[in-house]
Each structure stands twice: as C-alpha cells, then as structure tokens.
Image: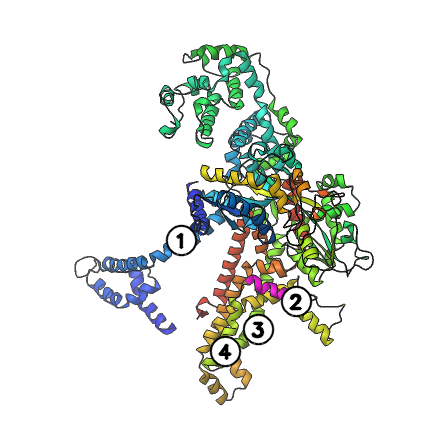
Amino acid sequence: MALSALNSDSNFTNFDQADGETMSDAQTAQTASSAAAARIADAAHTGPMLAADGTPLKKSLNRALRVQKMRALALIAPLLIFVLVTFIAPIADMLFRSVENDIVSETLPRTTTMLSGWGEKGTDIPGEPVFEALYQDMFVAQEAKLHTRLGSRLNYELTGASSLFRKSGRKVQDMGEVYQDQFEDLDGFWKKGENWNSFMASDAWLAAMDGWKKANGPQPRFELRDGIAQTLPATADIYVKYADFIQNVDKANLSKKDPWALVYSSLYRDLSGENGLSSYTGPAAAELAAAATAASTFETVNYTDAFKKIDRDWHKLDIWQTIKVYSPKFTSGYFLNAIDMQKSVDGAEMRPENEQIYGLLFWRTMVMSLTITLSCILLGYPVAWILANLPARTANLLLILVLLPFWTSLLVRTSAWKVMLQQQGVINDTLVWLGIVATDDRLALINNSTGTVIAMTHILLPFMILPMYSVMQTIQPTYLRAAKSLGATNWTAFWRVYFPQSMPGIGAGSILVFILAIGYYITPAIVGGTEGTFISNRIAYHISSSLNWGLGAALGAILLAAVLLLYYAYDKIVGIDNVKLG
Amino acid sequence: MNLTKTLMTSTALTLAAGMSFADGHMANELTIISWGGAYSNSQQKAYHAPYSAETGVKIINDESSAEAVSKLRAMNEAGNVTWDLVDVEAADAIRLCDEGLAIEIDADEMLAAGADGSSASDDFGDSLISDCFIPQIVFSTTVGYRTDMVGDTPPTSICAIFDTDAYPGKRALNKRPIGNVEWALLCDGVAKDEIYDVLATPEGQERALAKLDTIKSDVIWWSAGADTPQLLADGEIVMGSTYNGRLFSLIAEQNQPVGMLWDAQMLDFDGWIIPKGLPEDRLARVMDYVKFATDTQRLADQAAYISYGPARASSAPLVGKHAELGIDMAPHMPTDPANAQNVFVTNYEFWADYRDDMDAKFQAWLVK
C-alpha cells in the first residue's frame, strides 16, 4: 500500500504542478488513469480536457459524483435528522447555556444601560439615575414575577442576592405610590385606566376596544397615540410595557385596568422634566396642563434612599459590581467557575482555597476512570481469551454468564455490592471467619475509592470482554503454533504474536469503558463515599438540585473537550484504525 | 436569540417527548407527583382513594419528586406541563417559586378553613414558608442509634454525634450541609438562636466545618433517605441522621434494636406546589383536589399510615392510631409537644441565600 501510494504520488507531481491544484487522496486513486490521459491531452492542446458531450471532463465527473453523494445522503437522511434533532440539538442547547447570560440585561434593561457609565472599580455606589432605573426595572420584573429568577441567578455569584431581590420585589410596589396618591388627590381623572387610555392610546385602538368582548377573540393590540411619545417620552415608554403586560401576560381587559404606580411616577418625571406639553392639544390636555403646574409642588421620592430602606445591601458595592460584571449577554463566568476561578471587576481570579473543588474532581475522575479501565483490561483479557478458545457451545454458555449482570438493573447490582463490601458485609464476615482479619479491624472496602473501582469494574467489564472476545475469535490459532514450531517460548509466542493481534480489541474495549466511566454518577454516589465522587456527580447536582444549569453545562463542556482531546491523543499514539468493535 | 429559541424548543420537545406520550390528560384524571414508597402509599390511602371515590377522578401517581425541580423547568421551557400537582420539600418549593415555575397561592381563598373554625392561613401558621407552598406534613431530620452498640448510657443529646469517645463507631450524616452545619455549631457551643447569624459569616462557616472535621473519618455520608435505616439495621453504624418516619418504621414496624433522639431535630415541611402554565380546566380540577386533600381531617388521616405530623394545627387532636399496628400515633409525631421541646426550626430564608455558597464550601471540604 505504502509503495503504491508513493508511486502514484510521483506520477502526479508533474500534473499537479501543471494544473496548479491539489487533489484529495480519494480522488487521486479514481482519476489515476484519466490523469495520465490528461497529461497527454495537455501536451496536445492547451484547453481543458472534454468529455464526450463537450463539457469539461472535470465538471462532468464532479456532477456524476455529486449525484452519487446526494443519493447516499438521502438514504441516511432519516437517521441523520433523527440524530440531529434528538442528540445534537439538545447537547448544543445545553452547551450553549454555559455562556448564555441574557437574563440580567433582559430583566434589568434600563439599569444595565445606565450602569455602563458607572466606574465599577471605584468606591462609590451608582447615583440616583441608576437607582431610578432600578426601580423601573424591578417594578416591571416583579409584575411579571421575574425578579426572583434574576435573584437566584445572581445568587450563584453573590450570596444574598436571592433574598435581596425577593424582598425588594415585594416592597418596590409601594415606592411610586407617593406619586400615584398625589395625582389621584389632584384630580379624580387620574384614578381611572380608561381616562389614561383616552390620551395614551390611538383613536383606532380605542374604537376597536369599544365594542370588544372576550368572546370576540383576542384583544386588539394596544397602539400608542401619534405624537404622545414626543410629548411624554418616559410615560409612553412605560405605558407600552404596561399595556403589553396586561394584554399578553395578565390576559386582562386593558380598558378596565388601572395603571401601575410606575406609570404615575413616569408621568411625574415627564411633567417635572423636559416634555412637549406646551404644544400638546390632544385629549386630556387640560388635565395634563393642570397636573404639570401642580407637579412642581409634589412630594418626591429619592430612590437611592428608598432602596437603602428596603435593604442596606443596595448601598454596598458588591451587588452593583456583580450586576455590572454579569450585564453582557454572554459570559465566561460559568466556565471560570468550572475551573475554580471567578469573574470579578478586576477580571478572572482564583477562588478562595476553601471553595476550590472542580480541578480536583476533574483530575480524580480521569485517574479513577483510567484505573477502572486498567483493571477491566487485567480481568477481562483472560476471560476473553478463554471464551475465544473454547468450543462454541461452552463459549456461548460462558458468554451468557458474562452478560447476565449486564441484564440486571444497575441499582440492584450497585446495592448488591454494598451488601458484599460493607464492614459487616459478606466479604468481611468471611475474612473474619477465616481468621485473616481481626473482627475489630475489618477492611474498609466501600465508601471510598476502592469501592468505586470494584463496583464500576464489575459493571463495565462486559464492555471490555465483548470487543476483546470478538477480536480474539478472528486470531488464527495456527499463528501461535507456527511461532512455537519456530522455537518461540510460550511467553514470546504470546507477547510477539498473539498480543499484538488482540490490540484492536483492547483499544475498543478501553475506549468504551473509559468513556462510560467518566460519565458515571449513580455508582460513585452510592458506593464512593467522599473519595469516589466524580465530576459527573457535581454536574448532576447542578442540573437537578441547584438548577445552576449554566455551571453544569460548563462542566459538561469541559468534560466533553477532555474526552475529545484524549480521543485525539489516542488516535495519534495508537491510531483509531487500530480499533475493532466487533 | 432566535438560535436559542430554536435550540431550546427542540431540547424541550425531546425532554418532554417521553412524558407527553403517556400524557393524554383525560378530562377526569390528575397526575400527581410524589416521593414513592411508604409516603406515596399514605397519600394514596388518606387522600387519593377517598377523593376518587367521591368525585370519580382517576389519580395517576408518579414517583418523580426527587427530580421534580429540574423536570418542571424542562417542561416549563417546553411549554408543555404534564404534571398537575407536585409534592416537594419546602426548600425546593421556595426555589420553584423564585424561578416562576409554581403558581402563587392565597391560602384563605383556595384552601379549606380549619375544622376548629380558624382561617386556613392561621391554621397552617408558620408552615406557609413560601407564596407557592401548600403545606402537608411536618417532618424532622433526627438521629437514630443502635441500642446494642451504645452501652449502658444511650445518647440523649444531639451532640453524641460528635462524641466519638463515648460512642465510638461510624455515624451516618447527610451528604449536604443543611442540618449538619447547624448541629456542628450547636455542639461547638453556639446558642441556638444565634446559629444562623454565625453561619452567615465566613468565620462561622469555617467553624462549623472545623467541628465536622473532628469526626470526618468516622462519617459515612448518605444521599438517599433509605441509607441510614439500612446501615443501622446492618450494624454498620452506631448512629446516623435520617427522617423521623424512617426511624419509626425501623423501630415500630421492623422491631430493630434502634432508638431515636428528639433533641435539636431539624423541623422541616413537605407539601404541594401547583405548576405554572396549567390550562384552566386542569387548574380547576387541581384546586378542587388540593382543597379536599389538605383539609383538617385528611391531614390527620395521613398520620395513620406514616409518622409525619399534619401541617395544620387543627389536625393534631384528630390524629388517631396506626392503621395496622394499632398504636397511638400522636406520641410519634414531630409536632407532639413532648417531642418538640427542643426542636430546631430550619431557616429557609437563610438557606435560599446560602445554599449555593455553603454547598460549594461543604463539598470542597468533603473531597479533601
């Protein structure tokens, strides 16, 4: 093979250079003969080589190949689609979560925008505009019950954020009521949602809502009145949010609802700040003008103080630093957490020593998985050899014995090991009875790494024996006999002749066992104690208990990358062609 | 964003596929998620059977409570909630409520008033620990010990866990910080009402772990509720923490040489949450069931099958005898005044904040 490859290479050197393009190995073989012809043709006339119908030969060949490829693709399409939908897409989605972080900027859009101007490395907390933005964001978020979600998210980074957001959400409703009360005291007009709609909503929408009933179908979508966004910018902005929430989340009739306190505080902001009221002539112009005059004497709210009153933590730097650091839509925070680091205002830094865990667990998972793989090879090789060298009938019977535990529930097998291995268990009792160990000095075989290796070796053994067995079956016994007849000792004959031929089986079995081992978490959790904890136990914890799916995904991504890296290394060192699964 | 949506929908579809095949949701069915085993059995007898007999609604039991939190999130993202009612621990109820995966409850409006005339919110009292939580039982995590392995002086205090001189041998503790760190501080001399203040500081957390460090080599860490009873029955451990109902069944039903402590036991609640996103007809059916299943009599009935206390104060006088053994159940309730003399009430607010942080430190300490 090597010789022929070399030959065709040298044949092609001229052609490739002349044509100025390279060819793939697969094409090389197929076009070998035509290439020779092409060279001759090239010498005769300078144009490209043509097929019988006049198209360039290369094009026509490509077309023929393309049709073949499409047909093959169509044949595997059902499986491909199935794998993509049920396997690749969920994994891609899960991995994507390890960097996704839009919850912060989506829940606190105004605050995060305002925070961009704040120096997070300084010693001052943000100013009043940021607190006002926080009030607006929190108000909208608590109406939609999203503030506690953000609290749990930020609590992964800053302990205490969870209760801070829960508590603030409850109290933020009252913050703007000062304005609501003053508007309502000023004029009963401001109490009614329909009065608000009369100048905030477009005439078309008001007309459509006039005859609308629930039975008529979906509520007409709220539309802002033309020009109101210029007249009352802040109010219009909030009112759209409010209307959208009432119509689409609350699913209530917008014309029968009275606005949020937040709407009143926004109106105050417009009336006391810049607005376009002087040129406004639409509905409720008189009421608005009266309110604008009165607003100058309104009692005001200082949001900085109001938040301090809810919880002093709002006046601490770390909550603001955390919000700012986690403002972007994508974050490296989860990956940093997964390698015992953390994201802070000064960039990435190591976690305190008493919180470092993942590096150790990754290392332990690798070492333990390798140990398990090795012990599977040691135990499985002789079994596979015996199976391969017995008459078919006996071999099949023994094979069933190998497969029998394979058909038993994983939990049952693991629990059985508990009964066997514990200090008052079968093995220790037997050893004490035999007088090998003293009764007060029983062996610790479980709730440590020994227990994990024993139980997992047993569980994964069939995955090692089966590929070995299928490879060994194909090794001709005559080779061994030939080696011996040529003077080899038993050992030499095995080591130089038999073992190299059984390597593909060992390779396949090792890859299977190793990859299965690093992903195991039920068995290590049951028999492993503290020494037997694998990284997958932490992934399971974050997925099912702490709900920190981002961190779980980041740990999973690192594990996946580590496996691919090992696979690549295996391919480079041993060669993946040298693996036989059956 | 679009990519996220597409990916999320496809994942959710896949995740939900398995459940939705069996879904169907007949007009007259309720899918109720619980913990399985003796606990589900007690619910079946005290709640489900009488409710089905009365209304004709068929109740489907699913034993998925252990992974309820993650599954509910997956279902919610898929927009296809196939569960009607879920039995969860109080701490998980807070988490689900925060994540917006459970609906909020107005106890007085949605639940039955107490048989003694008290309003539902008064009757449930402190057990209403979250806006979404419908309390059902009170249970406690306490310590059981082998009576034949502790000599002539059986332990009377929770601090026996840390006393390896008086009670040598292995002890089993929960493989998570909650409960353990409180006991560690208590036995390190911190006053009971100051424990959570101390635990809120890094030094306090260090102190708790340092105390646990003194017995680290003697501890077998459990993660399933059945572990400690098994270890006690096998004589693998001298003492271990577990739920009081498990110890009751070990002592009263299986007659094992085991005793239990009622000292600084961690009082905890278990109850229902209603998933967010149920269509109106199913929601109405669930509400009807919940009102029935959490009334005074039903909660008291459950205590005949398992030794967990009813969450309503008005149910306590109605607690009767064990359905099979015929023994009085009242003295075995965590809510019984004699048992509750030195009870330790878990601070859920604290754990909602510190769970992630404390767990990271605890696990890091554990693996070293």
Quarter of the image for residue A444 reads bottom right
Above or below residue A177? Residue B347 is below
Q: Nearer the viewer, mark 2 or mark 3?
A: 2
| Chain at tag 3 | A
Mark 2 Cα shell of 10 Å, populated few (<14), some (14-19), many (≥20): many
Residue type at the position of mark 1 = Leu
Which of the two discs, 2 and 1, labels the residue nearer the N terminus? Answer: 1
Measured from the top left, where is residue B345 in percent x and y? 70, 41
Q: Residues within 10 Å of mark 4 (few under 14, many from 20)?
A: many
Q: CA distance from mark 1 to mark 4?
A: 39 Å
What residue is pinned by disc 2?
Answer: A421
Q: At 75% from the left edge and 39% from the top edge, which residue is drawn?
A: B194
Number of other residues with Cα within 10 Å of mark 3, as a class: few under 14, some 14 to 19, many 20 or more? few
Q: Nearer the viewer, residue A291 or A50?
A: A291
Discs 4 and 2 carry the same chain letter = yes
What distance separates the C-alpha of mark 2 from that of mark 3?
21 Å
Is mark 1 in CB contact (under 8 Å) with mark 4? Answer: no
Disc sitting over residue A387 in the figure: 4
Locate residue B275 relative to residue B21 in the image: left or right.
Answer: right
**Residue named by callout 3:** A378
Question: Would you say B53 lies left or right of B341 here?
Answer: left
Residue at left offset 40%, top offset 18%:
A227
**Toward the viewer: A363 or B280?**
B280
Q: In the image, what residue type sits under mark 3?
A: Leu
- On residue A84, the disc is 1
Residue visible at 30% across and 65% down in the picture: A14
